[in-house]
Image: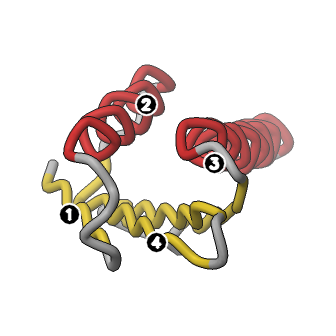
Amino acid sequence: MQYQVVCRNPELPEALREYAKTRVASIENYGQEFEKIEIILDLERGETLCEIILHPFRGDSFVAHDRAHDSRTAVDSAVGKLERQFLKFKDKKSSSRRQG
């Protein structure tokens, strides 16, 4: 899997990039591999913006974004949104297989 972390503001620390990578890597524990993961971090009006895009090998991409005053909170919230999207997708996929 290929990670691409983009910081649009040079004031964001390197530790935040690594933290975002490790948090997003936890999504792979749900049994899906992704071709590419994009993490976009920005600082705007005192808030950290975090956007995460997961590109699977087949199908549509998963996108989540959030903003918060605390950088780690923005990353955690965006990862939480992605986890909910992905679990909902897996549930729909598995229920359609059972029906026919």
Q: Position of residue 87 (x, y in %)?
A: 70, 37
On the image, numbered disc 1 is attached to which residue? 4
Crowding at mark 3 (Cα within 10 Å: few <14, some 14-19, many 20+): many
Amino acid residing under circle 3:
Ala
- Residue 97 visible within the image: no
- Is there a contact, CB below 8 Å, between mark 2 and mark 3? no
Q: Viewed as shown, does residue 62 lie left or right of 25?
A: right
Q: CA distance from mark 2 to mark 3?
A: 12 Å
Q: CA distance from mark 1 to mark 4?
A: 14 Å
On the image, numbered disc 4 is attached to which residue? 42
Camera-side residue of 39 and 44: 44
On the image, numbered disc 2 is attached to which residue? 23
Crowding at mark 4 (Cα within 10 Å: few <14, some 14-19, many 20+): some
On the image, numbered disc 3 is attached to which residue? 74
> What's the colour scheme?
secondary structure
Amino acid residing under circle 2:
Arg
Work out whether 23 lies above or below 69: above
- Residue 72 visible within the image: yes
- Is there a contact, CB below 8 Å, between mark 4 and mark 2? no
Q: Mark 2 falls on what kind of element? A: helix
Q: Position of residue 21 (x, y in %)?
A: 30, 39
Q: CA distance from mark 4 to mark 2?
A: 17 Å
Q: CA distance from mark 3 to mark 1?
A: 18 Å
Q: Viewed as shown, does residue 59 lie left or right of 68?
A: left
